[in-house]
Amino acid sequence: MSHADLTFAAWLDLSGEAAGRTAVAVARSTETSFVGIAPHAYAGRQGRVAFFDRDNLRYALVPGGTAQLGHDPDGFVASSQQRSDFAEAVAEYNLTTPLNRFLAGTVSPPRQVFLPARLVAVQSEETDALLARQEDTALDASNDECGHAGLIAGLARQGLRPPTPDEWEYACAAGAASLFRWGDGYPDGGLDAEEPFLQQPNLFGLIIGNDPYRAEFTTDPEVLCGGDGGSALCGGYGRFLTWLTLATDYRDSALAHAIYGGSLTGETPVRPVLPIP
């Protein structure tokens, strides 16, 4: 059986010794260096993480399996703070109401998917910086290969690819069914990307969905995940709209156009995926 078939439940059920043997085998098949394995907790849940290095990038094992993705707005129960914050945004920007109906237009729909296990970069990197590791030139509009197609081609030459939108959501949520990877609420006060808890690795050991400016490319050129490019935070849109950009399933339909139209491809982050054969 390929280790790409390793499910989250099976990974957690392994003994410590068996998990170590599995991680070593994954390192061998992906031509990475096995760094280590350890128990890991996040947002009240317990798990284990395994890390690998290749070409000065650190990866974590993200086991696969059947996963429920997307968010059901009708099942979301907003806190009094969220209702108040949303009411302020409605008054300011004439948003669609009620809150659950607004959410339905800003998050991906509920769906069940099956995903393979894979190695996922612990942190995203700007596209130009990542491609420049093995490329003579960075990705820009003067190249024959530019934009999203150039990103895909450049990563493929390194044996990598971006995550699919489903893979990105799953990697961020790590099985959590809440609006955010840590729960349904957010802290008092405005969003600050330097907030310590936003930099905490999630249950898979990934630092992900932690900065609205750092929306990340996926295999779908029209779908970026993990933020809105900073529009809500920079524009002072209020707590609800700003925190919502870090929801696991958040979608900004206008962001891709702004990235490509503004020649911002090279400075936009991507999180490399290293498939397990």
Image: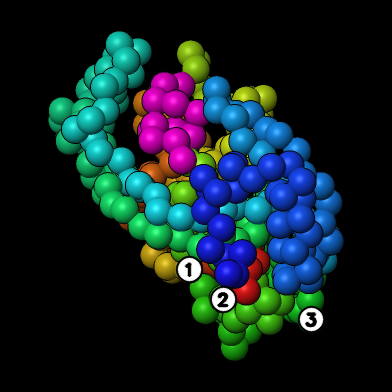
For badge 3, the amino acid type reads: Asp
Q: Are marks 2 and 3 in contact (CB under 8 Å)?
A: no
Q: Are marks 2 and 1 in contact (CB under 8 Å)?
A: yes
Classify residue 89 as left or right of residue 26: left
Q: Nearer the viewer, residue 265 or 158?
A: 158
Let me know if residue 34 appears in the view: yes
For badge 2, the amino acid type reads: Ile
The residue at 52%/53% (across/down) is 7
Quadrant showing the N terminus: bottom right
Count of labels in the image: 3
Disc nearer the start of the sequence (1/3) = 3
For badge 1, the amino acid type reads: Thr
Classify residue 161 as left or right of residue 241: right
| Neighbourhood count class around disc 2 (C-alpha, 10 Å): few under 14, some 14–19, many 20 upward | some
In which quadrant of the rendered view does residue 28 lie? bottom right
The residue singled out by tag 1 in the image is 219
| Neighbourhood count class around disc 3 (C-alpha, 10 Å): few under 14, some 14–19, many 20 upward | few
Q: Which residues are magenta?
A: 175-186
Q: How far, Cα to Cα, is label 2 from label 1? A: 8 Å
| Neighbourhood count class around disc 1 (C-alpha, 10 Å): few under 14, some 14–19, many 20 upward | many
Mark 2 vs mark 3: in front: 2
Classify residue 4 as left or right of residue 130: left
Numbered circle sitting on residue 152:
2
Q: How far, Cα to Cα, is label 1 from label 3? A: 23 Å
Quadrant showing the C terminus: bottom right
